[in-house]
Amino acid sequence: MRDLPKRMLFGPGPSDVAPSVFEAISRPIIGHLDPAFVALLDEIGGMLRQVFRTQNEVTFAASGTGSAGMEMALVNLLEPSDRAIVGVAGVFGERLAEIARRCGAEVTEVRAEWGFPVPADAVAAELDRGPAKLVAIVHAETSTGMRQPITEIARLARERGALVVVDAVTSLAGIPLLVDEWGIDVCYSGTQKCLSVPPGLAPVTFSPLAMDAVRARGTPVRSWYLDVALITRYWGAERVYHHTAPISMLYGLHEGLRLVLEEGLEARWARHASLGLQLQNALEDLGFRLLAANGYRLPQLTAAALPAHVDERAARTRLLDEFDIEVGGGLGEFAGRAWRIGLMGESCRENKLDRLLDAIRVVTEAKE
Ligand SMILES: *Cc1c(COP(=O)(O)O)cnc(C)c1O
């Protein structure tokens, strides 16, 4: 195969992958209905329940990246002319709203300025204007580095009979996320962020209430591939073929989840919290301006505007060419003037952070 560089991944995903995960992915393929493979699926379901902090029976890894999880959540719950209230405070909130519109829903966006969370009272005001099938919101907005508080919005939504859908693509295994305790009905994630597994799977969980809503639909789910009722006949006891499971990717996820639980979720959250804060303090010392509001910053993803004297593109290219370090460029409103720096999973290690900061110091040095 063509030679590929060895990079250190500090972008908004993918993150660095542990050697034992690569080792798992390279194991021999067995059939997707082989009893040994089915046992592995059961273990993955059990570990995902622990990582999501849920008892939901319908908890599995959907085939596809995080966006497939997003689409699975919405396409199964929404029918044409259902009302969906969507929090929008960045690119991923916009994607949620767009998918909900494509499901034929009447979408009400509740917007917040980039870098700020969506206020719970604004969501409550929309819920009071009329019933909604669901409220959907992004927990960790990867375009701005903002952490969205969930509990109050979830409580208000459930009180008014709306299901709660939460995007945890960047939050799962990076910051506290308690699906059952917070009253979340459908939650989805991706493998290549804080789980540190290559991209390709979307862990998802559906509450019993959400599954009731799926079963009560008057129209078939518009996506056959992402139909949760069909897929759970494979992931559940029946083991009916739906589509061929991505075997090797599931080996990798199994090992990635094992590593998360071996470390312990609390310890993993604490590691991200402490190194993320170190990075943010160091960036401010170097003249960067953090874009997410104080008190709502994600430790695992920092969006920061560069000091005025630095050419964003040139400095980012130097990081890649001279240091084999990847950071992300700004998205949307922040394109061309900010970086998005991820410290996710295996990329979130003290020795790696030191190397990252040394390199950033070099490429952002002011010339005399
Ligand atoms: C990365 C991301 C997604 C999309 O995931 P893909 O794996 O790129 O499809 C969705 N939501 C959030 C918050 C993300 O960070």
Image (tube, helix red, strand yellow):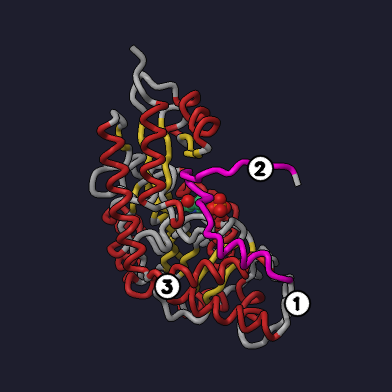
Q: Which residue is mark 2?
A: 4
Secondary structure of the residue carrying tag 1 is loop
Residues at circles 2 and 3 in contact by the CB criterion of under 8 Å? no
Q: Which callout, 2 or 3, points at the residue further toward the start of the chain?
A: 2
Q: Which callout, 2 or 1, points at the residue further toward the start of the chain?
A: 2
Asked if residue 225 is positioned above or below residue 180 in the image, the reply reads above
| Residue 175, quarter of the rendered image | bottom left
Mark 3 CB near ligand 1 (8 Å cut): no
Main SS of residues in magenta? loop
Is disc 1 surrounded by few (<14), some (14 to 19) or many (20+) residues within 10 Å?
Answer: few
Secondary structure of the residue carrying tag 3 is helix
Residue 31 — which label?
Answer: 1
Q: Amino acid at mark 2?
A: Leu
Residue 19 in magenta stretch: yes
Asked if residue 100 is positioned above or below residue 115 in the image, the reply reads below
Image position, residue 188 (x, y; %): 49, 64
Residue 262 — which label?
Answer: 3
The answer to whether residue 88 of the structure is visible from this angle is no
Q: Amino acid at mark 1?
A: Gly
Q: Which residues are magenta?
A: 2-28
Q: Nearer the viewer, mark 2 or mark 1?
A: 2
| Residue 30, quarter of the rendered image | bottom right
Per the model, the C-alpha gap separating discs 1 and 3 is 28 Å
Residue 367 — which label?
Answer: none
Is disc 3 surrounded by few (<14), some (14 to 19) or many (20+) residues within 10 Å?
Answer: few
